[in-house]
Image: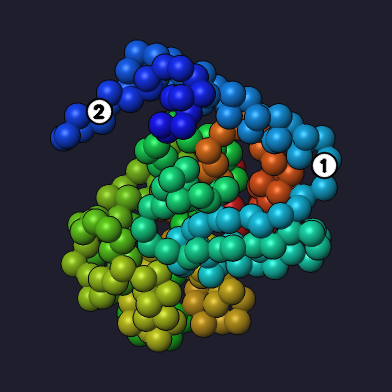
């Protein structure tokens, strides 16, 4: 900084024994320099966009469970399609700061809270009720939501302690009070307990349908469903999406919607 001050013939920092602060000239110089750097970054991104072919390292993050359910297979397909791209993926339960931690992209479930980020909706997770065929033979098949109160309930707790299921059929909504036999913060644990015949669970179709296909789970009250959970691809800015980010988002949208297990 001292060398720069000598070259400019101006003092950029006001120095005391306890602190440093920008002078008025220093502040103006800093703002202009930041603007120049931003223009250089815009130019670099514009050139990368013009090249078209995804390349470089894509850093992305997502939740652990949805990562195992869907994102891992999206990454595999992405790498197959784009040989000039590497992927650095972090599956984590924490909310990653994309900008400060240097991530290109996040896949997030639920309502978005950070209005400073851009997002593209990929779809939503649809939910239904499921139980093992053997359990339903022993306990009977519920014919209405209120009948679920007489059944063992297996509940995904997540980050909240929800005391009810909210179920919908068209415009009609019912709420079922819960006294769960199992409350777990892991969807797979709830699914596996249902497959073992321990009760009825409200599960994402993406989780339950493979076990329905092999006969380990059976839909319960198939006309009723739980609230859908939106799924978004989130990134720092929609102004300059690099080819590596844009191509992954497009692929994720295609694969998620094509699975037949995502809502609109």
- Quadrant including the N terminus: top left
Asked if marks 1 and 2 touch (Cβ < 8 Å), the reply is: no
Left or right of 136: which side holds 103? right
Mark 2, residue position: 15
- Whether residue 100 is visible to the viewer of this picture, yes or no, is yes
The image quadrant that residue 155 belongs to is bottom left
Residue depicted at 57% across the width and 48% down the height: 104
Q: Secondary structure at mark 2?
A: strand
Separation of residues labelled 1 and 2 (CA atoms) = 48 Å
The residue positioned farthest toward the left in the image shown: 18
Q: Nearer the viewer, residue 258 or 27?
A: 27
Question: Colour mode?
Answer: rainbow
Residue 177 location, x and y as percent? 21, 57
Question: In x, y percent, where is residue 214?
Answer: 60, 82
Which badge, 1 or 2, is on the more N-terminal residue? 2
Residue 228 visible to the viewer = no
Tell us which disc is closer to us: 1 or 2: 2
The residue positioned 43% from the left and 45% from the top of the image is 100
The residue pinned by badge 1 equals 52
Question: In which image quadrant can residue 79 be found?
Answer: bottom right
Identify the residue at horizontal 69%, vertical 41% (top origin).
Answer: 242
**Quadrant where the C terminus lies?**
top right
In the drawing, does residue 38 fall left or right of residue 198?
A: right
Can you say whether 89 is above or below 47 in the image? below
Q: Give whichever of 167, 102 is nearer the camera.
A: 102
């Amino acid at each position: 900084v001292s060398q720069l001050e000598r070259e400019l013939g101006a003092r950029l920092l006001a120095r005391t024994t306890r602190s440093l602060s920008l002078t008025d000239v220093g502040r103006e110089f800093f703002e202009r320099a930041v603007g120049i750097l931003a223009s250089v970054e815009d130019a670099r991104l514009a050139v990368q966009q013009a090249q078209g072919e995804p390349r470089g390292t894509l850093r992305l993050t997502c939740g652990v469970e949805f990562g195992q359910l869907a994102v891992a297979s999206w990454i595999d397909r992405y790498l197959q399609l784009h040989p000039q791209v590497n992927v650095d993926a972090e599956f984590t339960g924490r909310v990653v700061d994309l900008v400060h931690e240097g991530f290109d992209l996040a896949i997030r479930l639920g309502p978005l809270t950070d209005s400073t980020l851009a997002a593209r909706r990929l779809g939503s997770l649809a939910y239904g009720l499921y139980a093992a065929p053997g359990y339903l033979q022993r306990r009977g098949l519920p014919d209405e939501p209120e009948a679920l109160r007489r059944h063992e309930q297996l509940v995904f707790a997540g980050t909240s302690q929800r005391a009810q299921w909210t179920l919908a059929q068209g415009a009609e909504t019912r709420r079922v009070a819960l006294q769960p036999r199992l409350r777990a913060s892991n969807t797979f644990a709830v699914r596996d307990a249902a497959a073992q015949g321990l009760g009825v669970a409200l599960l994402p179709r993406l989780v339950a349908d493979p076990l329905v296909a092999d006969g380990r789970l059976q839909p319960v009250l198939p006309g009723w469903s739980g609230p859908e959970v939106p799924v978004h691809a989130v990134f720092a800015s929609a102004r300059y999406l690099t080819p590596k980010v844009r191509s992954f988002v497009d692929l994720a949208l295609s694969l998620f919607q094509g699975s037949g297990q995502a809502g609109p």
